[in-house]
Image: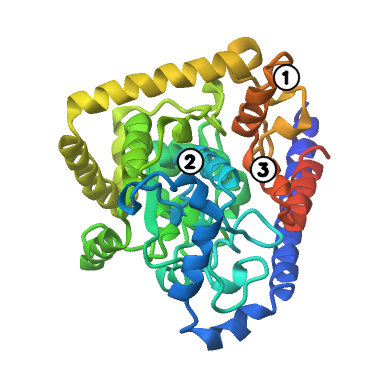
């Protein structure tokens, strides 16, 4: 029996090493297919000119014809998609709004992200030429405001979303730990608890994918994720971020966040209807004791400061909006969402991956397991609503394919991921 277990462990280790090597080869190939990256650095001052920004409005006049300019819906949006923060659900909302109104997206080329974890460059955008303008930028990136600003009109609304760092860390550790070589030597059933018992022993800032293990939000925003919470640069960076973003949503108060988003963008309730995307099955979620939560927040001190800062701003915005008005709007959003779920979803709720009937509704899974839920769509749906249902249920990868985005690197990665862990 011991020999069987040892052989199985050896097979997994070999698979992980193979995955690690081939992943790096793919990244090299991706960088070689992106020759404009260095060339475009020469054009650092090429921004979206006001004249071109005006032309973008030609595609969306139909949604604003009967409204004064100050009341027309916002169509120029930068959504900074952070990791493990319900950001994929926001992405689906933006995809549907942009597609409905024929907006121009800045999409990645070859992958579903902008060459993450490298800092964002305009040359990461599919078919980018200096001076190009876009309505919406929303795929995963490591934020670089100077580069992002070149793609958008001056009136673009900058939005992002945060999550309590304790819950984010639990989710991130579960989702990514098999892709982080630092965690491969952690023994025991509860690797998360073992890591938190002595994080410095299992962490090295220079190690491959180590950013997933410490202050992931800080890293996503382009900052040094290894700063200690008491470092003065932490608050300096947070204050600078406050100047960049017009609205910071909270995954922990998702419905209230959407109401604030609707208000900020001058959208309608129809525009923010959603079905939760990329939710995990309950059995895969680690229950965090108060002690573990405290350890996580101490280890991710910069993220905790970031979250607290914008948490206070978030609730100040709700006070201005009005608590009673917010309560009414949230109740209406819940009613409308429940209505759409009853119309669209077979069985009334999300199901495990093995029970999803159509491949187009299969969500991307973490390495080595299938913990992400998806949906089956009802067969008998009114034709007008069927299209809406299909869009609401479509995961990010499939939606990008529908847009015509090349995902050769993502597809290769997915094949490798599945091949290694079915050896």
Residue 220: image x %, image y %?
Answer: 44, 57
Q: Quadrant of residue 332?
A: top left
Question: Relative to residue 203, is residue 35 depicted above or below?
Answer: below
Question: Relative to residue 3, is residue 247 depicted above or below?
Answer: below
> Which secondary structure, mark 2?
helix
Residue annotated with mark 3: 399
Specify few, some or many for label 1: CA neighbours under 10 Å numbering under 14, 14-19, or 20 or more. Answer: few
Mark closest to the chain's N terminus, 3 or 1: 1
Question: Relative to residue 334, is residue 13 depicted above or below?
Answer: below
Labels in figure, total: 3
Q: CA distance from mark 1 to mark 2?
A: 25 Å
Furthest-front residue in this view:
66
> Does the rendering let one see residue 14?
no
Furthest-bottom residue in this view:
42
Residue 402: image x %, image y %?
Answer: 72, 45
Mark closest to the chain's N terminus, 1 or 2: 2
Considering the image in quadrants, where does the N terminus appear? top right
Considering the image in quadrants, where does the C terminus appear? top right
Q: Any mark on residue 115, and which? A: none
Residue annotated with mark 1: 355
């Amino acid at each position: 029996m011991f020999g069987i277990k040892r052989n199985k462990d050896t097979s997994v280790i070999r698979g992980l090493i193979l995955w690690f090597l081939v992943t790096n080869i793919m990244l090299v190939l991706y960088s070689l297919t992106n020759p404009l990256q260095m060339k475009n650095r020469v054009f650092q001052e090429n921004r979206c000119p006001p004249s071109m920004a005006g032309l973008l409005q030609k595609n969306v006049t139909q949604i604003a014809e009967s409204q004064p300019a100050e009341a027309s819906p916002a169509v120029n949006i930068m959504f900074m998609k952070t990791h493990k923060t319900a950001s994929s659900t926001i992405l689906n909302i933006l995809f549907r709004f942009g597609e409905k109104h024929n907006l121009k997206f800045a999409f990645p080329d070859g992958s579903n992200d902008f060459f993450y974890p490298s800092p964002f460059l305009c040359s990461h955008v599919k078919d980018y030429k200096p001076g190009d303008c876009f309505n919406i930028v929303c795929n995963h990136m490591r934020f670089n405001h100077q580069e992002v600003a070149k793609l958008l009109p001056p009136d673009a609304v900058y939005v992002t979303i945060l999550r309590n760092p304790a819950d984010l860390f639990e989710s991130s550790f579960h989702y990514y730990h098999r892709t982080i070589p630092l965690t491969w030597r952690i023994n025991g059933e509860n690797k998360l608890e073992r890591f938190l018992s002595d994080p410095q022993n299992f962490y090295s800032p220079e190690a491959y994918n180590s950013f997933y293990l410490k202050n992931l939000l800080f890293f996503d925003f382009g900052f040094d994720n290894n700063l200690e919470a008491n470092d003065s640069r932490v608050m300096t960076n947070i204050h600078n971020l406050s100047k960049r973003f017009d609205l910071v949503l909270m995954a922990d108060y998702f419905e209230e966040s959407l109401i604030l988003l609707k208000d900020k963008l001058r959208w309608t309730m129809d525009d923010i209807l959603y079905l939760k995307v990329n939710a995990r099955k309950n059995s895969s979620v680690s229950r965090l004791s108060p002690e573990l939560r405290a350890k996580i927040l101490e280890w991710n001190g910069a993220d905790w400061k970031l979250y607290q800062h914008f948490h206070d701003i978030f609730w100040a915005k709700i006070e201005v909006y009005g608590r009673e008005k917010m309560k009414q709007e949230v109740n209406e959003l819940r009613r409308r969402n429940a209505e759409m779920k009853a119309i669209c979803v077979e069985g009334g709720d999300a199901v495990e991956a093995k029970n999803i009937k159509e491949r187009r509704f299969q969500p991307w899974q973490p390495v080595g397991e299938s913990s992400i839920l998806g949906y089956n769509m009802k067969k008998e749906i009114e034709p007008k609503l069927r299209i809406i249902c299909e869009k609401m249920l479509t995961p990010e990868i499939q939606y990008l394919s529908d847009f015509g985005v090349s995902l050769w690197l993502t597809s290769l990665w997915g094949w490798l991921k599945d091949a290694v862990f079915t050896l």
